[in-house]
C-alpha cells in the first residue's frame, strides 16, 4: 500500500479548472516534490489531500484512508504546513508548540525527541513572540508544530518561499533527516533547483502533471542540444535570437540565455556570425547540460 495515492483528481473554481485528472502515488518514507510556478495547482492539491477541500472528481487516500470518508482519521495522522505562516503571532515560540501538542493530546516533553534537531535551533528564543521571529526561525517553529504529534505523512506547501538561501539549505537538510526517520513527505515548491533534493518529482503546470520521475532521470531524458549564450547587451540578444530563423527556444537563465535550435543541430559559428552582424560585442557561447528548469520549459512547450 502506498502512503499517498491520488486517482484522477479534478477541481474547478467558478468553472475554471485548477486540477485536471491528477494521478500519482507516493511510497512510504519517500520525499516527493510538486514542482511548478504559482497557479500550477499545487496548493489546491495539497488542500484536497489534507481534507481541507473536496475534489470535484477522483479519489485519494492517505495511509489507506479516504480523504473524504475518513477525514477525521487523516487529520490525526498528517502534519500540514501551509504556504503562509499560520501560527499565533502573539503567542511565544514555546506557547505555540505547547498549544499544538495539546490539540493532539501530546506534550513537548514526551515527543521532544521528534523535533529536537529542529526545535533546538530556536529553543534559546522560546519566550519570543512568534510574530517577532525571522523568516527562517518561523519556518523552524512551524515545522516543529506540525511534527510534535508524530505524523505519518507530512505536507509542506512552498515552505521555503520568502526565506534566505541559508535557511532554505538548512530546511532541506531537516527534511532529509525527517525522511530518513521513515516519514513520508510531500512538498511543493516553485524553485526548480529544489527538485534535485527530492527522491521523485511531479512537474506541474496549469493544473496538469507533465512528468513524474527521479530528478536525474528527467535531466537525462532532455532531448535537445543546449547552449548558453551571453553578450554585453542581454536584452537585445534575447530579441535578436528570438528573431533568428533557426531558433527553437531561448530563455533567460541568470547571466546567460539558454538556447535550442529547431532542427536540434546547433551551428555555433553560424550563430556567432549572425550576432556579429547584429553588432553584438563580448559574445560568449558554449554547449551545456540541461537542468530541471530547462526540462520544465521543454515539457511546457510540448504541452
Image: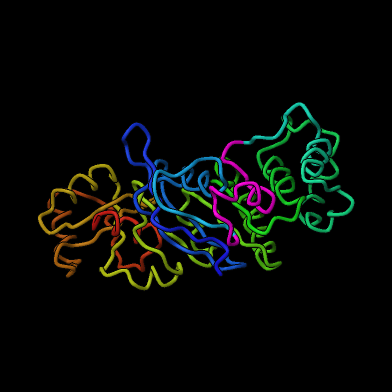
Q: Quadrant of residue 104?
A: top right
How many marks do you count on the picture? Answer: 0
Quarter holding residue 285 = bottom left
| Residue that extends furthest to the left in the rendered view of this protein | 245
User: Where does the N terminus fall, quadrant-wise?
Assistant: bottom right
What colouring style does the render use? Answer: rainbow
Q: Residue at x 25, y 55 (%)?
A: 303
Left or right: residue 56 versus residue 2 is left
Q: Residue at x 63, y 54 (%)?
A: 154
- Kindly give the residue lying farthest to the front in the view shown: 69
Which region is colored magenta? 63-84
Which residue is painted at 31% across and 35% down in the image? 15
> Which residue occupies the foreground of this view, 110 or 69?
69
Front residue of this view, candidates 219 and 207: 207
Q: Residue at x 49, y 43 (%)?
A: 43
Q: Position of residue 245 (x, y in %)?
A: 10, 55
Residue 299 as seen in the image, left or right of residue 72:
left
Q: Residue furthest top?
A: 90
In the orientation shown, which residue stands out farthest toward the right?
Answer: 109
In the displayed structure, 94 sits above or below 277; it is: above
Q: Would residue 126 be found to the left or right of residue 282 on screen?
A: right
Locate residue 234, reporting x and y percent.
29, 46
Residue 6 on the magenta segment: no
Q: Position of residue 198 (x, y in %)?
A: 53, 63
**Does the magenta portion include 78?**
yes
Amino acid at each position: 500500500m502506498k502512503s499517498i495515492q491520488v486517482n484522477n483528481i479534478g477541481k474547478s473554481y467558478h468553472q475554471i479548472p485548477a486540477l485536471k485528472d491528477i494521478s500519482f502515488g507516493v511510497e512510504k518514507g519517500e520525499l516527493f516534490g510538486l514542482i511548478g510556478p504559482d497557479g500550477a495547482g499545487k496548493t489546491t492539491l495539497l488542500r484536497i489531500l489534507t481534507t481541507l477541500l473536496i475534489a470535484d472528481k477522483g479519489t485519494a487516500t492517505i495511509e489507506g484512508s479516504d480523504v473524504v470518508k475518513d477525514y477525521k482519521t487523516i487529520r490525526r495522522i498528517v502534519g500540514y504546513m501551509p504556504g503562509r505562516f499560520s501560527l499565533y503571532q502573539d503567542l511565544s515560540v514555546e506557547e505555540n508548540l505547547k498549544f499544538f501538542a495539546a490539540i493532539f493530546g501530546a506534550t513537548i516533553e514526551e515527543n521532544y525527541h521528534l523535533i529536537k534537531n529542529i526545535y533546538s535551533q530556536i529553543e534559546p528564543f522560546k519566550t519570543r513572540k512568534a510574530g517577532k521571529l525571522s523568516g527562517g526561525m518561523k519556518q523552524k517553529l512551524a515545522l516543529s508544530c506540525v511534527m510534535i504529534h508524530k505524523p505519518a505523512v507530512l505536507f509542506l506547501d512552498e515552505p521555503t518561499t520568502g526565506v534566505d538561501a541559508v535557511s532554505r539549505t538548512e530546511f532541506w537538510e531537516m527534511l532529509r533527516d525527517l525522511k530518513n526517520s521513515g516519514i513520508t513527505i510531500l512538498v511543493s515548491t516553485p524553485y526548480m533547483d529544489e527538485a534535485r533534493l527530492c527522491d521523485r518529482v511531479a512537474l506541474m503546470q496549469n493544473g496538469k502533471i507533465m512528468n513524474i520521475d527521479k530528478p536525474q532521470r528527467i535531466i537525462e531524458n532532455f532531448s535537445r542540444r543546449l547552449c548558453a549564450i551571453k553578450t554585453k547587451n542581454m536584452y537585445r540578444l534575447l530579441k535578436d535570437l528570438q528573431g533568428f530563423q533557426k531558433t527553437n527556444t531561448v530563455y533567460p537563465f541568470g547571466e546567460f540565455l539558454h538556447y535550442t535550435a529547431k532542427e536540434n543541430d546547433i551551428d555555433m559559428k553560424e550563430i556567432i556570425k549572425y550576432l556579429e552582424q547584429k553588432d553584438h560585442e563580448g559574445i560568449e557561447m558554449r554547449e551545456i547540460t540541461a537542468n530541471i528548469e530547462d526540462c520544465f520549459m521543454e515539457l511546457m512547450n510540448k504541452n
